Image (spheres, rainbow, N blue to C red):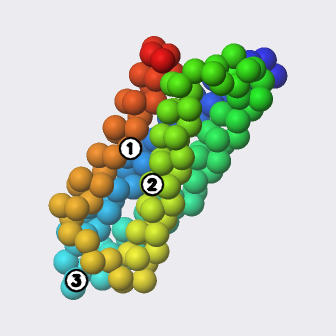
Amino acid sequence: MSYLAIKAWHLIWMVCWFAGLFYLPRLYVYHAMCEPADERGRQRFKIMESKLYWGITTPAAILTLFFGFWLLYSGAWSAYSSMGWLHTKLALIALLVGYHIWCGKILFDFKSEKNTKHHVWFRWFNEAPVIVLVSVILLASLKPF
């Protein structure tokens, strides 16, 4: 597979991963707002969150990382390893993987009725991937250092 094809697949899966990371915390906002007496609503959110996390977001994350490492192996590392922007980008991706795992922990908390966070907390939590996305795109596009 050509370098550009690998890059295209990396970007396609990255968009899918971020779509999940943007939507999942938004579901957590609405789930946290759900009234305790609304058992049917809470169960619906649990199903939606689980399907999004395990059926879309996690596979997209795995494929993004797979194609990203393939890009590094196919020449990006030898071309850019001495440049700071790549190391910064990789550090941000590591943080994003941690955020993804944190989303899974929150999923488990909601599933086991142990969530203690307010919907406002989830509104702020939802902004983190936006900051990472903007930073990674600027780093990869501008290669500033």
Say whether disc 3 or disc 2 marks the residue closer to the N-terminus.
3
Q: Residues within 10 Å of mark 2 (few under 14, many from 20)?
A: some
Helix or strand or loop: what does disc 2 sit on? helix
Q: Are marks 1 and 3 in contact (CB under 8 Å)?
A: no
Answer with left or right where residue 36 lies relative to residue 50.
Answer: left
| The image quarter in which residue 90 lies | top right
The alpha-carbon separation of the residues under discs 3 and 2 comes to 27 Å
Choose between 144 and 50: the one closer to the eye: 144
Say which quadrant the N terminus sits in.
top right
The relative height of residue 118 versus residue 12 in the rendered view (above or below) is below
Q: Residue at x 30, y 73 (%)?
A: 41
- Residue 86 pos. (x, y %): 56, 27
Choose between 51 and 131: the one closer to the eye: 131
The alpha-carbon separation of the residues under discs 1 and 2 comes to 8 Å
Q: Which residue is mark 2?
A: 99
The relative height of residue 99 versus residue 84 in the rendered view (above or below) is below
Mark whose residue sits in front, 3 or 2: 2
Q: Residues within 10 Å of mark 1 (few under 14, many from 20)?
A: some
Q: Which residue is mark 3?
A: 36
Q: Residue at x 78, y 17 (%)?
A: 2
Q: Residue at x 30, y 82 (%)?
A: 39
Going by the numbered disc 1, the residue's amino acid type is Pro
